[in-house]
Image (cartoon, grey):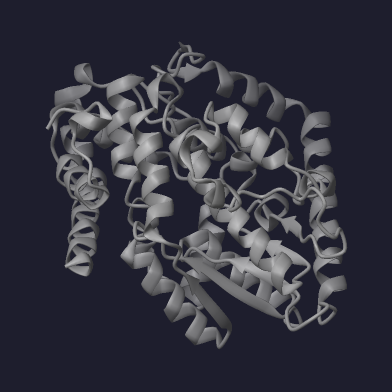
């Protein structure tokens, strides 16, 4: 039954994606007065509180354009990125075959286009790096992504573990946070706890297995928003303390002690008192590589790793994203993931046409209870929640 529901949810999302990209552009003009105006460059919604539009362009893009027009700033940025790439390359080369036990790196492998691209590039540029792939199956991951993880791992003939935690852990997380999103938006609340817990399970696994590196496909915009910096490796002093958990609690406004049992609170990383020689380095190759969408899709196509039709985060992301989007649009007027995607568009790492269509369709669908509504209903059913409990109308 659960597998049938997961396939139905995937089918719903495929339909949403198709309508957003192929039909919505023809209908946009009929409904433009019912949806928010957007920046012509980064497509961010004018309903984001700190956004103002001038001549159709937002204040952040105006500032970004000024920086790009500054030759000194552009040269500095290129040098900074190149410096990170060289340091990342040196770090990975220095760990090839040098792990203390069987593996040199634990790759957090979600099955989305970014993690598949990261793995493919690692295998080409650092073939001597002994990697173990780790995927989560928390009951709410995309069926498409889970299947892709297994296919890619088999094709590359790599060791791969699928970690399935107790269902109560993630159900507790989602039920509590979805009921308490309020004005912060789901990006800073639901997604922050979910994403942080995923990372931290990887930290503990690497620590227990004595794996020196943990690699994740987090892009620089995500890292800048979540951790206030955009460097390719997490500061080691943060890994040796409770800093990451403290930061998560401050930004989300939640205390894990208010949500989880004493035993489940131990799933969140605290490096205090741990053997520093076993604490892994947390490495984010995308922050140094900065590939654009064309480079990613080109690599996936050349290596026959993922067809473009399966590459959208709408299809490969967590099923709970549908509920988060509906809550955001009802509560704050826009999808709280937009600032991250807009930042990536400014740096030419995302497609503005695709995301304008997707965000506008999501706004229209949430306000008129079409397309998203079916998916939201199914995912709420899996969580044992009602529309009313998360502040939505059936």
The picture quadrant where one finds residue 100 is bottom right
- The foreground one among 14 and 235 is 235
The picture quadrant where one finds residue 74 is top right
The N terminus: image quadrant: bottom left
Residue farthest to the front, as pictured: 262
The reply to whether residue 193 is visible in this rendering is: yes
Rendered location of residue 61, percent (x, y): 56, 24
Q: Is residue 72 above or below residue 116?
A: above
- The foreground one among 101 and 111 is 101
The C terminus: image quadrant: top left
The reply to whether residue 312 is visible in this rendering is: no
Q: Residue at x 80, y 68 (%)?
A: 92
Q: Residue at x 50, y 32 (%)?
A: 188
Rendered location of residue 161, percent (x, y): 53, 76
Count all numbered tags in the image, as a single digit. 0
Q: Is residue 192 above or below residue 63?
A: below
């Amino acid at each position: 039954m659960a597998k049938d529901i997961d396939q139905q949810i995937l089918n719903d999302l495929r339909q949403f994606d198709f309508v957003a990209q192929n039909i919505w552009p023809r209908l946009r003009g009929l409904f433009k007065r019912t949806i928010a105006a957007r920046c012509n460059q980064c497509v961010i919604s004018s309903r984001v509180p700190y956004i103002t539009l001038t001549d159709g362009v937002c204040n952040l893009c105006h500032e970004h354009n000024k920086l790009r027009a500054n030759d000194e700033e552009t040269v500095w940025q290129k040098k900074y990125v190149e410096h990170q790439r060289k340091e990342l390359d040196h770090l990975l080369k220095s760990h090839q075959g040098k792990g203390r036990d069987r593996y040199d790196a634990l790759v957090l492998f979600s099955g989305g286009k970014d993690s598949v691209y990261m793995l493919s590039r690692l295998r080409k540029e650092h073939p001597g790096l002994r990697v173990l792939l780790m995927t989560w199956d928390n009951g709410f991951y995309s069926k498409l992504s889970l299947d892709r993880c297994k296919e890619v791992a088999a094709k590359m003939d790599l060791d791969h573990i699928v970690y399935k935690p107790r269902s109560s852990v993630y159900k507790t997380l989602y039920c509590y946070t979805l009921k308490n999103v309020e004005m912060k938006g789901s990006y800073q609340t639901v997604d922050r706890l979910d994403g942080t817990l995923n990372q931290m399970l990887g930290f503990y696994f690497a620590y227990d297995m004595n794996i020196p590196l943990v690699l994740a496909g987090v892009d620089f915009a995500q890292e800048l928003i979540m951790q206030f910096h955009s460097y390719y490796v997490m500061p080691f002093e943060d890994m040796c303390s409770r800093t990451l958990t403290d930061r998560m609690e401050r930004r989300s406004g939640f205390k894990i002690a208010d949500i989880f049992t004493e035993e489940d609170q131990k799933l969140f990383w605290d490096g205090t008192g741990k053997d520093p020689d076993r604490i892994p380095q947390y490495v984010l190759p995308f922050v140094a590589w900065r590939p654009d969408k064309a480079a990613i899709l080109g690599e996936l196509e050349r290596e026959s790793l993922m067809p473009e039709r399966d590459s959208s985060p709408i299809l490969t992301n967590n099923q709970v994203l549908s509920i988060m989007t509906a809550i955001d649009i009802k509560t704050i007027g826009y999808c709280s993931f937009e600032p991250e995607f807009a930042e990536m568009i400014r740096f030419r790492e995302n497609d503005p046409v695709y995301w304008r269509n997707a965000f506008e369709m999501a706004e229209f669908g949430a306000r008129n209870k079409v397309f998203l509504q079916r998916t939201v209903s199914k995912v709420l059913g899996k969580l044992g929640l009602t529309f009313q409990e998360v502040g939505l109308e059936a």
